[in-house]
Amino acid sequence: MKQYLDYDPDSGIAHWVETDEGTGITTYGADQDARAIFQANQDAYNADHGRWGELTHVATIPTVLFARLVMAGTISAEGEVYDQQELRKTLKTVLNDSDYRKLRTRPGVI
């Protein structure tokens, strides 16, 4: 059973710990209530966007998804990109996937 350690209402992030009684393995994690982010993304998605251009805002990514990129070794915790091409490939795959459509702030293919 998850035991919640803390909750930050500003970010919607809750940290937790869970120990598997059978194996004794303890897991630490974080969950984020991203409903406000998803609603803001939907509002932006539905707005008139005009033309695509350089530095066009196409998505807002919740902090816990950023943390997954850090844990995967794609970027550092400070936001330093280790492999620019790999990061672009990963973000394009995620942001063009319909399962992640709530991250998008505008239509189209990246």
Image (spheres, rainbow, N blue to C red):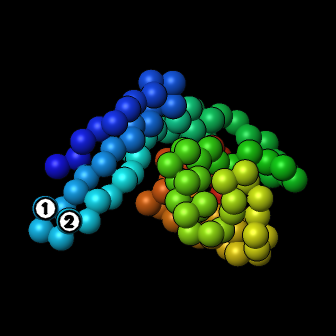
Mark yes or no: residue 33 visible: no
Question: In which image quadrant can residue 12 be found?
Answer: top left
Q: Is residue 69 found left or right of 48 in the rendered image?
A: left
Residue for point 13% across, 62% down: 21
Circle number at residue 24: 2
**Dot 1 corresponds to which residue?**
21
Asked which secondary structure carries label 1, the reply is: loop
How crowded pointer 2 is (Cα within 10 Å; few <14, some 14-19, many 20+) is rated as few
Q: CA distance from mark 2 to mark 1?
A: 5 Å
Q: How many marks?
A: 2
How crowded pointer 1 is (Cα within 10 Å; few <14, some 14-19, many 20+) is rated as few
**Is the C-beta separation of discs 2 and 1 under 8 Å?**
yes
Residue for point 48% across, 61% down: 98
- Residue 40: x, y in percent? 56, 32
- Amino acid marked by disc 1: Glu
- Quarter occupied by the C terminus: bottom right
Question: In which image quadrant can residue 85 be found?
Answer: bottom right
- Residue 3: x, y in percent? 24, 42
